[in-house]
Amino acid sequence: MELFDVDKYQLPDVSEIDWNKTIENIGIFLRKYKVSRERIGVPDFPKMTDRFTLANDEFLDLKEKKLSVFYREYVELHQLFIIGFSAIVHPFRPETSIRRKQVFMLRYVYGFSIAIVSERIHYQKNIILEDSKTAVIQFADALSLLALKR
């Protein structure tokens, strides 16, 4: 009897992914997430700590905003964002997990190019590209946004 079924948690190979559709799906989610943030009066971009984890103080200022008709949608989307973002990890190297999260935030949430991200975090463009792919796969997989080729 298997205690842990590895196949159940295996990510697809890069060649199996429909990148256009996956990026489109993530874009739809992030657009809606940013709109929901703006509607209740928080900054478009989630607060990050210096180790690129999500800051927990965002909900402290939301007492009055709970009355907003948009609050429930914001909470739902923020929880989904946390699920996707926390799935961006390297199993053995915490520093790689932090870098991948940085790359994901800078490229896909803030919209910076590979060249700008490379300059900001001082890594070569090929590393940024690889981290981007891995982060997208992990984020999209966690939220069921990953599209595979047919």
Image (cartoon, rainbow, N blue to C red):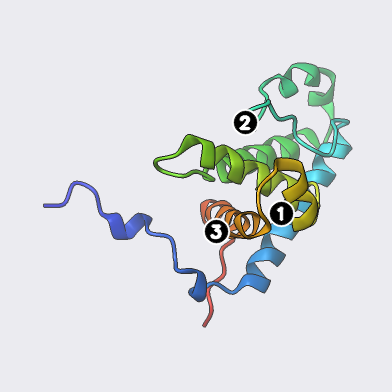
Q: Residue at x 85, y 33 (%)?
A: 43
Q: Are marks 3 and 2 in contact (CB under 8 Å)?
A: no
Q: Amino acid at mark 3?
A: Ile
Res 81 quadrant in image: top right
Q: Amino acid at mark 2?
A: Thr
**Is 27 positioned to the left or the right of 39 in the image?**
left
Q: CA distance from mark 3 to mark 2?
A: 19 Å
Looking at this rendering, what residue extends furthest in the left direction?
1
Q: Residue at x 77, y 33 (%)?
A: 71
Looking at this rendering, what residue extends furthest in the bottom direction?
150
How many numbered marks appear? 3
Q: CA distance from mark 3 to mark 1?
A: 14 Å
Q: CA distance from mark 1 to mark 2?
A: 20 Å
Task: Kindly state the secondary structure of the residue where label 2 is placed.
Answer: loop
Residue 88 versus residue 126: which sits nearer the camera? 126
Task: Kindly state the secondary structure of the residue where label 1 is placed.
Answer: helix
Q: Amino acid at mark 1?
A: Phe
The residue that label 1 is drawn on is 29
Residue 52 screen position, x and y as percent: 64, 33
Residue 53 screen position, x and y as percent: 62, 31
Crowd class of label 2 (few under 14; some 14 to 19; many from 20; radius 10 Å): some
Q: Residue at x 62, y 28 (%)?
A: 51
Residue 88 screen position, x and y as percent: 54, 45
The residue that label 3 is drawn on is 137
Residue 45 screen position, x and y as percent: 80, 38
Q: Is residue 15 above or below residue 141?
A: below
The residue that label 2 is drawn on is 53
Choose mark 1 or mark 2, whichever is in front.
2
Q: Residue at x 11, y 52 (%)?
A: 1
Task: Kindly state the secondary structure of the residue where label 3 is placed.
Answer: helix
Mark toward the start of the polypeptide (3 vs 2): 2
Mark toward the start of the polypeptide (3 vs 1): 1
